[in-house]
Amino acid sequence: MPKAPWVVLLVSSTALARPHTDANGNLIRDAHSCGTTTIKQPVPGAALFSAPAANAPRTIYLNKNGGTYNVTTGMTDAATNTANVIASGDGKTHMAAVIPPIDANFDWNYIVQCVKAQYKPYNVIITETEPTSGNYVEAVVGGDGASTGWSANSGILGVASADNFCGVTEKGIAFSFAHNHIGIAKANDELCATVAHEVGHLLALEHEISSPDTMSYVPFATAGAKSFTMANSQCGTDAQDTNNCSCTTTGTGQVTDSALRPGGKAESWEERLLEDGSRHRVYKRWFTAAGLAQELGGGETVHDGPWFVAVRLPGA
Ligand SMILES: [Zn+2]
């Protein structure tokens, strides 16, 4: 038997499928987060951006014109407009899904300049012309997500098709659902924040609670400004909703997570906006015990069941 105290998170399939309010009464999210640990960890901010080989800049393609996308069970590929079902609203594949152009409500040039400002400190090229070769990530900005399985009242702001979470998805696609930003205070700034946030996931960033940071859920109009801040921050989505970090060393102790369900999707970022204007991006992830142990750098499986898995880290 393990000697260290440890926490098991039980998540049923029913609970995963039904959003709910958290203990604060104002958040809809699953009572489940990736890599839940017994030890809280701060996450370094911009340091998580990683430079590509030979220090060449990464390219971010901003697409306001929409297009036809295939949401499949395969790898994400911006060059072929192929996303993974992790970015779908219903966990299903969607072939020939049409993303419409951005609504006329928005000031596209303002948004482009805003996204460029967000990424100015980093070694990236932002272009509105789709590259014809090489790796690039695409941010497509338009629609309400209906063509990729999101319900009309989901309020979803965006979702990242990030195959390699905690690492760079070299050909990732970030969907920002412009239509769902209409009516939000400072809508152009909020849409810019969503684009920068979803691309951030493609570049290995996870959520942090710091209000002005782009990777928090705090709306622009509340935070007053959004950028990738350099300060350390607790992981989570806002000050009322903290998580242990998923993408840093978890230290010693037990780590549990819900099991990778047969036929299910391995992970998912889902973004929602509540009636009070707060923004919520819900992260769900499912593991096998072996997969969890591999991600943690080794460990002993102490439970591998249909609804949860538990791995004891070496030395724990
Ligand atoms: Zn997010």
Image (spheres, grey):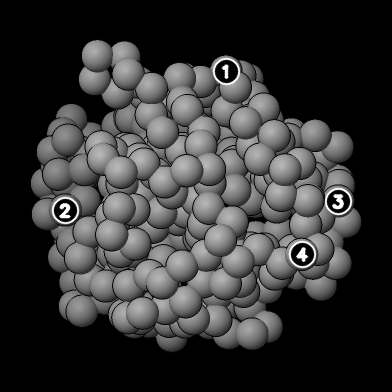
Q: For residue 91, which quarter of the picture? A: bottom left
**Residue 213 visible, this orientation:** no
Q: What type is the residue that disc 3 sits on?
A: Lys
Q: Where is residue 35 in the image (x, y as percent from the top left)?
A: 36, 48
Q: What type is the residue that disc 1 sits on?
A: Pro
The residue lying at 60 percent from left, 66 percent from top is: 101
Q: Name the residue under label 3.
A: 186
Callout 3: helix, strand or loop?
A: loop
The residue lying at 63 percent from left, 50 percent from top is: 194
Q: What type is the residue that disc 2 sits on?
A: Gly
Q: How far apart are marks 3 and 2 (CA)?
A: 42 Å
Foreground mark, 3 or 2?
3
Q: Distance between the residues labelled 1 and 2?
A: 34 Å
Q: How far apart are marks 1 and 4 (CA)?
A: 30 Å
Callout 1: helix, strand or loop?
A: loop
Q: Name the residue under label 2.
A: 291
Q: Distance between the residues labelled 4 and 3?
A: 15 Å
Q: Position of residue 2 (x, y in %)?
A: 20, 46
| Residue 121 circle label | 1
Q: Is there a contact, CB below 8 Å, between mark 1 and mark 2?
A: no
| Residue 151 circle label | none
Q: Position of residue 115 (x, y in %)?
A: 64, 37
Q: Outermost residue, top direction? A: 54
The residue lying at 64 percent from left, 85 percent from top is: 152
Mark 3 or 2, nearer chain start: 3
| Residue 104 circle label | 4
Q: For residue 51, which quarter of the picture? A: top left
Mark 1 or 2, nearer chain start: 1
Sort mark 1 into few (<14), some (14-19) or many (20+) by Cα contacts within 10 Å: few
Sort mark 4 into few (<14), some (14-19) or many (20+) by Cα contacts within 10 Å: few
